[in-house]
Image (cartoon, rainbow, N blue to C red):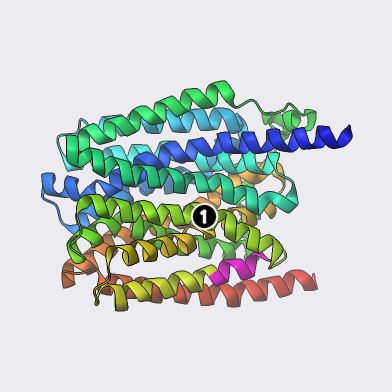
Amino acid sequence: MSQNRQTAKESKTWILLLIISTAYIAVFANIQGFKALLPLVQDEFMISRAQVGLYSSFYFLSAVFIAVFSGRIADYLGTKRGLVLGVGLVGFLIMLHSFSPLFGIILILAFLTGTAFSMITPSVNKGVIELSEPSKRSLSMGIVHGGGGLGGFLGAVMLPYLGEMYGWRTAILIGSIFALIITFFIVKFYQPPAKKEDVEEQQPHKKTSSLKSDLLMFLKNKYLLSVFSMGMVFGMSISSVTGHFALYLTRDLNTTATFAGLGLGVFHVGGIVGQPFWGYINERVFHGDRRIGLFLLGILISGLAFFFGLVVSRFYFPPYAILFFSFIFGFCTMGVIAIYFTTISELVSREYVGVVTGLALIFPRASTVITPPVFGLIADLSDAYANSWIILGLVVLIFSAGFLYFSGKSQDRINEN
């Protein structure tokens, strides 16, 4: 009888985690779908590669500014209300994209959309930590964040197809309506089991420390700071790919916009598979050693960036090979997300998950603000993306080596204490 109750409890947990993942599906279908439409947007507004990269910069610029505050709000509101607020606002703001007469207005809307998006990740992570057992957190985090890859695939494949048929404005309007539908879905179906201890932890009066004191406490943890550096790695790599991959395929490899959207979509499919896979490998093969998992993925990301810059950009490959390379790139590049968020969430008690997630988001988002326009500028200077990939590979390699060195020293000091 008790075994049946345990099985029912686990089934309900997985259902709730899948419902949480729909927030990522809706948001990333719109954000990555719009990025896949950028070749069409570029043609309409006649902008450069560097200007195209500004979209990602503006989107994440606001997210950097309010990351910690959004984490604090997520701790206060709880998972459900945080998701509903974030997804609903993103859907509304993306809808406004479709009516914009100027690219400058789209950049302003991107800034506002990034603000709304900031609510989602802390709420998602909080939900995963509350629902999952410690031995399954990395896998659960990978499955839930894999919703972002699924959404990215749907948006990157479907919206360019719709865009070529009906125009990019109609395509993004359809995407925004999808996000609003998901908002109502979460309102109706996300009903987590009520637990006395969970309810008590979510009460505002339980958190007596100030935000400033919380941040100072986290910033004194040198191992946590070294983990944040890997957040910069995945911010640089993911934003470079998602912000420019469609343009890279159309401009450098001479593919169609539809195929470029498919390539970006396959990149996200790799992320769907990679996040739970690397979470599982981290639990079973590396026995929960997050440090090894993060470093290994950093090296793989660096190697793949070199491969695109030195090989793919210089030699002809058939379309199916390009799609395979896109899959592997997404498999490794987005695979780091689950381990990263699991690591930082495990280093604090549950009532601080939202705040530390917000702090952890500053690092990938800060690199996301800077990297896409620089990545595009390097391509503008040489009229190709090959050098952009090579420089990205060098930077990721340096950061990964630095993480291995400094995290090892921090761990030694922690063990000695």
Q: Main secondary structure of the magenta part?
A: helix
Of the pair 23 and 201, the residue shown nearer to us: 23
Instruction: Indicate the amino acid at tag 1.
Output: Val
Residue at screen point 32% across, 50% down? 56
Q: Residue at x 38, y 41 (%)?
A: 29
Question: On screen, 35 above or below 94?
Answer: below
| Depth order, front residue of 342/11 | 11
Q: In the rendered view, does 177 fall on the left or right side of 233?
A: left
Q: Which residues are magenta?
A: 288-296
User: Residue 331 colored magenta?
Assistant: no
Quarter that holds the C terminus: bottom right
Q: Position of residue 55 (x, y in %)?
A: 28, 48
Look at the image and tell me whether residue 244 can be seen: no
Q: Is residue 114 left or right of residue 192?
A: left
Residue 193 placement: quadrant: top right
Residue 290 seen in this snapshot: yes
Q: Residue at label 1?
A: 273
